[in-house]
Image (cartoon, rainbow, N blue to C red):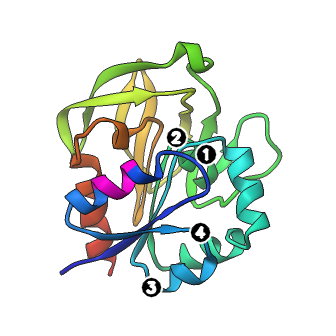
Amino acid sequence: MTVKIGVLALQGAVSEHIKALKDSGAETIAVKDASQLEELDGLVLPGGESTTMRRLMDKYGLFDAIKIFAKKKAIFGTCAGLILMAKEIEGRKGPHLGLLDIDVKRNAFGSQVDSFESDLKIDHVAESFDGVFIRAPYIKKVGPGVEILSTYNQHIVACRQGRFLACAFHPELTGDTRFHEYFVKITKENK
């Protein structure tokens, strides 16, 4: 069974996500319009700057459409996408999409110059995976029903809650498709 997964194309490594999804066996499109969501089985919210992404989602009529989409479909958020999905964001009143029962800290590992890579163990994905952290958040705490998939220095950096998957790093920048393959699997299970 083939699934069709969109990548929100407002900011971030859109083409890299598209390539990783295609290499993982999914059909994929860059999503720039809310009407495109109707044909999708899943959606990737890529990295970027979460506040800017939220403004662009509002400007282009995508915010409410994604909230409706999320009621039944799978979503994978990376870095800023994770922040958009969180129910709690340190230093911010209220969530963006509020899909994941998690509390996040933005830019938790420092600024752009503090970006780094680290080998991660990711449950259900890989014993060894190259985590690329760029102005990355981390998850401070998770609610019931949220499965912690990976940690770095005792900070949660990947999780899953049902059909929602999120990570603080950028798997699309590694050339390793295993994390995207896992999302394709989740999307198929949810279809």
User: What is the spatial separation of the Cα atoms under label 4 and label 1, in whole angstroms?
Assistant: 20 Å
Which residue corresponds to mark 3?
39
Residue at 46% over, 52% down: 14
Residue 144 percent across, percent down from the top left: 49, 53
Q: Which residue is mark 2?
A: 79
- Give the residue furthest to the front: 15
Of residues 110 and 56, the one nearer the viewer is 56
First-in-chain label (4 vs 1): 4
Magenta extent: 16-20
Q: Is the C-beta separation of discs 2 and 3 under 8 Å?
A: no
Question: Which residue type does callout 4 highlight?
Answer: Lys
Looking at the rendered structure, the secondary structure element under dot 1 is helix
Camera-side mark, 4 or 1: 4
SS for dot 4: loop
Of circles 2 and 4, the one toward us is: 4
Between tags 4 and 3, which lies in front?
Answer: 4
Q: Which residue was labeled with disc 1?
A: 83
User: How far, Cα to Cα, is label 4 from label 3?
Assistant: 13 Å
Badge number at residue 32 = 4
Q: Compute the Cα span from label 1 to label 3.
A: 25 Å
Residue sitting at 59 percent across and 69 percent down?
32
Expressed as whole percent of the image width and height from the top left, the position of residue 90 reads: 72, 35
Quick one: which residue is furthest to the top in this view? Answer: 113
Report if the CB atoms under discs 1 and 2 are less than 8 Å apart: yes
